[in-house]
Amino acid sequence: MNCSSTIYVTENLSKAPAGDIRIHDVRHPNSNALNIIKNINYPSIYKNHLSTLLIDRYMIISRTKEIAKTIHSEYPHDEPLVIVCILKGSSPFFHCLCRELSELGHPYMIEFYRMKSYEGTESTGKVQQMQELPESVVARNVIIVEDIVDTGNTLTSFLPFIKKKRPKSCKICSLLVKRLTDDSDQGSSSNVVKELDLDDKFVGFSIPDAFVVGYGLDFNEMYRDLSDIWILSDVGIKVGGYGL
Ligand code: 5GP
Ligand code: MG
């Protein structure tokens, strides 16, 4: 399919916040990216829906391996972590992370939790929780796996509920965060991400303030099936997803 235009897939760690968290800042053009995914098979119904390849599958996998290694080094090996998948978007990242932890021989339990705050390309500001919290989090080390943190509304409303269950510890692991190290957004104090305690997080990539799809991330339920992360084209936005 014809998915050309600017390609951003480079790591720039120089602006990563201090501390142990290594955030890959994705915004520099890399002409290898289109070659890497040139031959992949995307559904033909997505033709012209995508404009910019932001993060390809190989970067996602290699970064996930790094995060798993960090987790493995930070938590005890003789008790299970409880890894909570926030459905639906973080599902591919969650499974990849779990697989890597299994490769490292790290014990864990898994839980799935459904929340929703987006309609179309906009945050509704209201976070809908769809079920009771799992009891397994009580007195255990918990990692909440998210696909993307944007305004931070989802996590700021969810964390107090999980903390009420008195886990031993609770950290967030998000594949993406928006705007965290983007110079153009330095003045944006409305970004709750900056107010969340970064030491409590594992983060894959910091991305520009654009609506992204793929690797579990949807636009009205469309594009979750892509293996790479893209910025939608105007055509894609106009199509409006599956309307669910
Ligand atoms: P927040 O509550 O931090 O604003 O947003 C969190 C949730 O909104 C994410 O878990 C994700 O489901 C959705 N979201 C935020 N930004 C994007 C985006 O760029 N693309 C997609 N597909 N979903 C997003
Ligand atoms: Mg999500």
Image: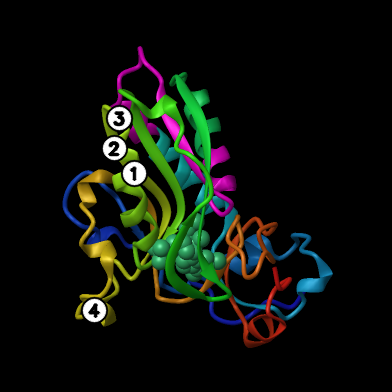
Q: Amino acid at mark 1?
A: Phe
- Eyeballing the image, is 234 above or below 13? below
Which residue bears the numbered disc 4? 188
**Disc sitting over residue 167 in the figure:** 3
Model colouring: rainbow
**Disc sitting over residue 161 in the figure:** 1
Mark-to-mark CA distance, 4 and 3: 32 Å
Q: Secondary structure at mark 4?
A: loop
Front tag of 1 and 3: 1
Q: Is mark 3 within 8 Å of ligand 2?
A: no
- Toward the left, the furthest residue is 18
Q: Amino acid at mark 4?
A: Ser
- In the image, taking residue 107 as reference, residue 167 lies left or right, namely left
The answer to whether residue 32 is visible is no
Picture quarter with the C terminus? bottom right
Q: What crowding class fits label 2: few (fewer than 14 Cα within 10 Å), some (14-19), or many (20 or more)?
A: few
Q: Nearer the viewer, residue 201 or 182?
A: 201
Q: Amino acid at mark 2?
A: Lys
- Of the numbered discs 4 and 2, the one sitting upstream in the chain is 2
Magenta-drawn segment: 69-96
Q: Secondary structure at mark 3?
A: loop
Mark-to-mark CA distance, 2 and 3: 8 Å
- In the image, taking residue 44 as reference, residue 140 lies left or right, namely left
Front tag of 2 and 3: 2
Q: Amino acid at mark 3?
A: Pro
